[in-house]
Amino acid sequence: MHHKTRHATILTVAIAAAAIALGFAPQRAAAQDTYKVCSDIPWPPFEMGTDGQAAFGFDVDVMRALAAVEGYNVKIQNLSFDSIIPAVRAGKCDIGASGFTITAKRDEAIDFTKPYYVSNQAVVTRSDGSTNVIAAMAGRGPKGTVGAQRGTTGASWVKENLVKKGVNVKLELYETYPLAILDLVNGRIDAVIQDAPASKSSVASYPKKLTVAGVINTYEYFGFVVPDGDPAGVGAKMSDGLGKLGLNVVDTAAGKELSVQPGTPWAKLSSAYFGPDSDTITAAWKSCKGTLLNAGSMDDVESYASCMAKATGK
Amino acid sequence: MGPDGAGLILSQFPEFLGATLVNLRVFAALIPIGFAVGIGVALAQVYGHPVVAAIASAWEWFFRGVPALVLLFLFFYGLGRFGLDVSAFMAGALAMGFRSSGYQSQIFRGAIQAVPAGQVTAARSMGMSRVQAVFTVVLPQALRLAIPSWSNEFSSVLKDTTLVYAIGINEVMRYARTVYVSHAELAMITFLAVALIFWVLTTLGNAGLHVLERRLAVPGFEVRGAGGARADR
């Protein structure tokens, strides 16, 4: 990315020089940097839609909003979750934005921005009374098995806190959490452990069959991913931009606390994305997206966030 | 998954077909690579100098022995370490094409060896060079004989194009995912829609290859010991 930019700059200067020499005025003095953002779409409400311009969701919108307020461009690329960190390391993506939980292990391989979201793990079970949350987590449900998406913190929580501590429960890993939910509905597993915001849409898909039976307070923080050492400096720009959008991180004795100023774009986007169902969010995106896709300033971002909040009825 | 589900899948069908075009593009890129390299490897194994034959066999051994997903990751992430910035499409076409060349080489080797060696001797005695004999006498017959087994490889790699989602190519399985993640209750019907698309594609492709096989068959001509075109009875 970095050397490419440099080549692009040299080329731009050469073309500009040639244009001036030929008597044309250059269109633009310097082109804005474009960063490739990789997200695993869909993962509602963080990642929705399909790819490129048709992608949206909380992460994706924040990516575009940060680009607008910090003065760069982004291109959204759909890539499977497991592949994103290797792709950032290999220089195939400049930014990973896909609900990444900040962990010390991941931090060794890549860098994180400031945290932007706190998430806990929900335990989803069937609501038919065949098992309860205690029995399911203890491996005493009908199948003695719980499910999670491979590579997620939900999966490692079960491994660290149940399997390794001698609880006789089997952990079944899935490529995506909807497949785990499908197996739960079909009775092949007793519970699914997944991020609390995502569990809401799982239950919304099967309102009569599933319920969130419990929440494990893991206080996980989500962060955006950039290459180790942040060579392009885009991680620092994003952390700075998060503050401009209205999100502040306060260090307290208990840990990091995220404080959101009311009325800011951050507050409006959060209310638009966390709560309403997917269809409402999708309809809102369709009516508001023009402002964000062409956003070049804080004003544009503000009017987009207001539009989303209004369209989702918040 | 009632009539609503079927209606939703039907309404999404143009997008499904659009995503299938991505699979077909990957397929169109990988098949010629596999075909050309596969024939080269087969010729090297049958007629090559022992050193060349050994290199060809090592190539075949490697690309037949490594899982497709591993090859995709090696080409997409690995080549970057050597300063080669390949696009996901290029990495996918090369990885899957080279893999297919390993399989295709063995189809062609069998077919080349099914053409009686005496024909090369006969061609040489008529004043043809060895290269001429191989390219004008042996290969046309061998390619004809190879069609039935090649149709297997055709069907196989066509379906294997669904693996390239792993390096960020948004093909039809990846698109199916966008549907069933938002509508979990539609997972099964989504998979069935993808199955139907590939069933139609392989059926059409194999029918085409069958027509080609019959068009190219030489009436009354028989090659002993070959699995392919038999003219008897």
Image (spheres, coloured by chain):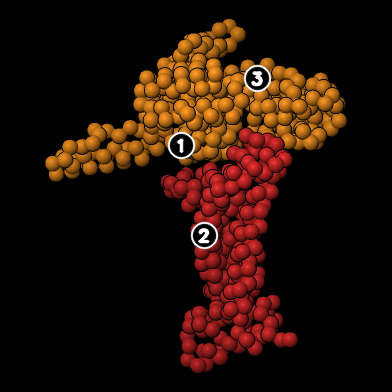
Do the residues bearing badges 3 and 2 touch, measured as CB atoms within 8 Å?
Answer: no
Q: Earlier in the sequence, mark 1 or mark 3?
A: 1
- What is the display colour for chain B? red
Residue A71 visible to an observer of this rendering: yes
Q: Are marks 2 and 1 on the same chain?
A: no
Type of amino acid under label 2: Ala
Q: Are marks 1 and 3 on the same chain?
A: yes
Per the image, label 2 sits on a secondary structure element best described as helix
Indicate whether B83 appears above or below B183: below
Kindly identify which numbered label has been placed on residue B28: 2
Residue sitting at x 58%, y 74%: B212
- Mark 2 belongs to which subunit? B
Q: Residues within 10 Å of mark 1 (few under 14, many from 20)?
A: few
Q: Which residue is mark 3?
A: A120
Residue B205 occupies which quadrant of the picture? bottom right
Do the residues bearing badges 1 and 3 touch, measured as CB atoms within 8 Å?
Answer: no
Residue ranking furthest to the top = A253
For the residues labelled 2 and 1, the Cα–Cα distance comes to: 27 Å
Chain that is coloured orange in the picture: A
The percent coordinates of residue A132 (x first, y second) are 82, 22
Determine whether, in the image, residue B112 is placed left or right of residue A192: left
Per the image, label 3 sits on a secondary structure element best described as strand
Q: Which residue is mark 1?
A: A53
